[in-house]
Amino acid sequence: MSDILSLAGKRIVLLDGGLGTELFRRGFPQGGCPESWNFERPDIVKEIHASYFEAGSDAVLTNSLGGSSIKLSCFGLSSRAYEINRKAAELAASVRPAGRFIGGSMGPVGKFLKPQGDLDEAELEAAYAEQARGLHDGGADFLLLETQYDLREALSALKAARRSTPLPVFATMTFDRKPRGFFTIMGNTPEACFRDLAAAGAAGLGANCSLGSQDMAALTGVLRPLTALPLIVQANAGRPSLSPEGKVVYSQNVSDYVRFVPEMIKNGANIIGGCCGTNPDYIRAMAKLVRS
């Protein structure tokens, strides 16, 4: 089976859409630990992965975004970090069709490094290394450091993941659009993020979350000149708001969302997918555009 980097050099690679979106649709409670369902409701996690493969995804991301021991400590699950991540990869791999891929999702730990917070780099790297090993041992084909908002944390995560597994490691930062351009909430610029992450050995770079597809298409044009590596973009389904029933809804429906996908591709994206608010219907529509 060709690796995902080889595939991205030949055609557009399609990732999945929002995993949390689909968990909530199936009854996952607000404020809970999504990764706990890898053991409590594995049938639902597998069903979601299978639905994205059926919709046309070349790769799906594991249910492990908050799977670091630091993040899991909020739910009393820090001691189970390795097995939770291994199980996350095993569930996705169990429904993988031939020729498709499993990406190990690794999100931010939810705490800040010193001096902004009380976290030191050694503790952070140890948590990411443990998570990466679990995902690798469960069958992930690559790792994706996603929704990263602090370049220092992303660099620590990249170092740990590369040191502890042989898997290619991609990194996507989350940027907001400001009058002066695109920045993370820590003030990191795309130029600084891409320069430092590439130097640290990232196999691919990009952006996910925060932005709807129109702004993400514009950001793609900013990012492409900054790297020769595969470029990954995963937009939200627009801006979130609360419905009268208290549910989170997003401003972009499928047709509005996908009309900006050709611009993402024109602007140089190699790997595309959806983020918060997207579901298999969005991926199915994106697959039609990509395959054509």
Image: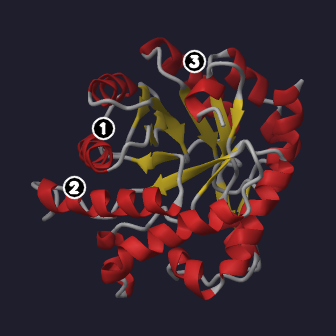
Between tags 2 and 3, which lies in front? 2
x then y, percent, for residue 66: 44, 66
Who's the residue at 72% across and 77% down the image? 44
What is the three-letter code of the residue carrying label 3? Gly
Classify mark 3: helix, strand or loop.
Answer: helix
Give the Cα separation between the discs numbered 1 and 3.
20 Å
Q: In which quarter of the image is the N terminus?
A: top right
Q: Which of marks 1 and 2 is in front?
A: 2
Cα distance, mark 1 to mark 2?
22 Å
Residue at horizontal 70 percent and vertical 52 percent from the top = 17
State the residue position of label 1. 187
Q: Does residue 66 appear to the left or right of 262 in the view shown?
A: left
Mark sitting earlier along the chain (2/3): 2
Between discs 1 and 2, the one toward the N terminus? 2
Task: Report which residue position mark 3 lands on.
Answer: 221
Q: Residue 39 carries which label?
A: none
Give the camera-side residue of 222 and 130: 130
Disc 1 is placed on an element classified as loop
